[in-house]
Image (spheres, rainbow, N blue to C red):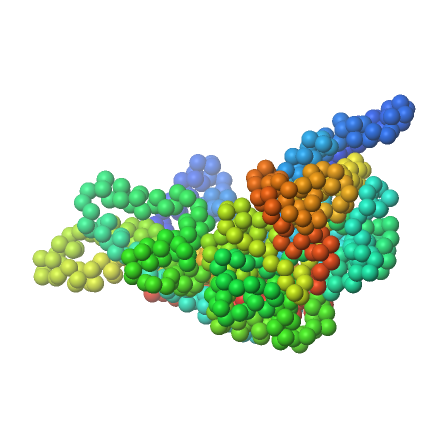
Amino acid sequence: MTTDKRAGKAGKAPRSVNRRSVLKGAAAVAGTAIGSGAITGFPTIWAQNIKNVTLRQVGTGVSNLNAVADKVKEDLGFTLQMTALDSDAVTQRAVTQPGSYDIADCEYWICKKIFPSSVLQPMDTNKIKNFNKIVPLFITGKLTPDSVIAQGTAPHTVGFVEGKTSTKFAKQPTNWMTLIPTIYNADTLGIRPDLVGRPITQWKDLMDPAFKGKASILNISSIGIMDAAMVCESMGAIKYKDKGNMTKAEIDKTMAVLVEAKKAGQFRAFWKTFDESVNLMASGEVVIQSMWSPAVAAVRSKGIACTFQPLKEGYRSWGGGLGLAKHLSGIELDAAYEYINWYLSGWVGAYLNRQGYYSAVLDTAKEHMSPAEWAFWMEGKPAASDILSPEGKVMEKAGAVRDGGSFYERMGHVACWNSVMDENKYMVQKWNEFIAA
Amino acid sequence: MSQHTDVSAAAPDRVAARGARSLGGRLPGMAVAYLQALPLMLVLAVFLVVPILTIVVVSFWDFDEFQLLPDFVLNNYADVLGSAVTWKTYLETLKLAVLTWALTAAIGFWVAYFLAFHVRGLIWQTGLFLLCTIPFWTSNIIRMISWVPFLGRNGLLNALMLRLHLIDQPLEFLLFSDFAVVLAFVHLYTLFMVVPIFNSMMRIDRSVIEAAIDAGAGPAAVVWNIVLPLAKPGLAIGSIFVLTLVMGDFVTVRLMSGGQSASLGLLMANEMSLLQYPTAAATAIILLITVLLMIAALMRAVDIRKEL
């Protein structure tokens, strides 16, 4: 643990010098700003001081995009350093090295694990300009007023704490938000329509003996167990009370099904990272597997047919957000709020939507997308023109329709959210046994 | 041999004595010797002893989901040793280690033999030896990953064999299997055998071999009775490299087995990713002891100091 401390200090030491000088400058400029009555245009006023700020963000690969860091530099003037890790590593880093980052970009189920260890500080919703426009899934848990709340760690259940210094999750929305939602999606199985040879309609098709040695499931225990649960429930093998919070008996039964399938040679491989899933699919090693939307897009962009297949039982959904490290204060905290407000102001939203994810504030993202893009990605309509990726590559030809349809069609059919269970430790142990089996 | 050791053991004393004189004879010889060893001792203490002691200490700590709780509990060892997964993983890892060791030793021995005895001239020997090291100019991840498009279901090898009508179904066991793991290990680590064995063989006195041949020994007898025994130290050093590398590996097993096999390294990586540092520390200590025992056994069988 000594190394952690050292790393934390080493990371901070050069900055504290900066911070002091920056603060002095900030006070001076703020003074003149108030004097001149020009307080409204804060980005320009702060620009000079904020330029020296560096915010360090750790998060998963999905949203740690260099394009975002570049745009932050361009629009806001300060530097955003991104470190992309896998979900487990984010949790670990967030809890054990709280001094090594300023912003934690993590999923809601990770938040459930790390927020109680008081390494993050909640955000004042009054400082979030577009707070009222955030998709209600993250506030009340209901996409539309008559939606049913899905199983698992639904984001709104860990989205708020009771007060500024509290680490207790609030049952109702409060003024103190744990994470500002940034990115979310509904996941399902990816298939190679040219190689499966029949329509895929249910989660249980993953276990079809026809795909022996050609199936894969992801090896991130907390997410893999959910996909497994969707499969088991679809097979009729197990009926769960809450897939997101299984009992030991339910875990045992689920694992028994998985181990049996593994021993029978159903799985070709287990994947842990995005690119592994792309390679497995693109090379034809695997024809049906748990997959993430942009991975499907990546396979397709190689000219290989790949479908993100909507299934009868619904989607397994996930969401992530930005959390502020507890140690943030002064101008860095201001910069972080500015970054978050900028994040929700549309440019990133449009960028994420164009990758096949969803953004937290739809109205602002829409302003940054062409009507054809909006219709294709969000309304599930046939593409009026070629659909380009954020990098400008053709992703879909004119006339294509998004797998699963519109935003409401997809996010309205969430069966379960990624979650962390009460029996997490037991589940992980069993998952390890499955991998070693 | 014993004489040789005596000389080398005496040498530092002489150096130390000289050092003492140059310091004006105020420090006793022993102190100077310790002073001279101090820098290395400090480096080893800071970068080897302290970290290992930390791991030992942490392996007795308690933990919950978020933090480590300083304590003295034996739960971690009980959990690790009491779990069937650990034993299975040990067997699995040992199996990989033994297979890899046998293959690298066999290949390494004959490559070194060829270089040492069949290639004439130091220039050719050095040249070919350097040739062996060329794969090491790229990172080992790259060397590992390159097997994937080669061995895959639609990979080069399967495509070639299908076209030649040697098989009519792609061979599935080539990739994401124990076969693939061992293949990658052998590819990665054979050089670690070649180098020390080659080094040992180059020290073999050629007149011994000539004498054997003059006395009527055939090539097989020469290899068996002279080259092999005299190359043993090299073989032992190579074995230490290969065994420790394979026992501690996690990335090769993960990539080449497609995440379907477990190894001790993977087990630890999993435990750490779940913040179960004390369990991972306990696993690490047990692994350390196992590997040290293996090396101790090797040292008993072969006198490696002869080589140094």
Q: Nearer the viewer, residue B224 or A388?
A: A388
Examine the rendering and report whether any part of residue A239 can be seen. Answer: yes
State left or right for residue A254 relative to residue B217.
right
Q: Residue at x 43, y 67 (%)?
A: B94
Total numbered labels placed on residues in the image: 0
Q: Position of residue B197 (x, y in %)?
A: 30, 54
Q: Position of residue A83 (x, y in %)?
A: 63, 44
Examine the rendering and report whether any part of residue B59 can be seen. Answer: no
Q: Position of residue A360 (x, y in %)?
A: 75, 47
State left or right for residue B221 relative to residue B20.
left
Q: Residue at x 71, y 66 (%)?
A: A244
Residue A68 lies, with reference to residue B165, above or below; the image says above
**In the figure, residue A140 lies in which quadrant?**
bottom right
**In the figure, residue A342 lies in which quadrant?**
top right
Q: Residue at x 41, y 58 (%)?
A: B153
Q: Nearer the viewer, residue A114 or A246?
A: A246
State left or right for residue A1 relative to residue B9.
right
Q: Position of residue A47 (x, y in %)?
A: 76, 28
Residue A321 lies, with reference to residue A157, above or below; the image says above
Q: Nearer the viewer, residue A106 or B286?
A: A106
Q: Residue at x 23, y 50 (%)?
A: B116
Residue A162 lies, with reference to residue B32, above or below; the image says below
**In the figure, residue A68 lies in which quadrant?**
top right
Q: Nearer the viewer, residue B301 or B157?
A: B157
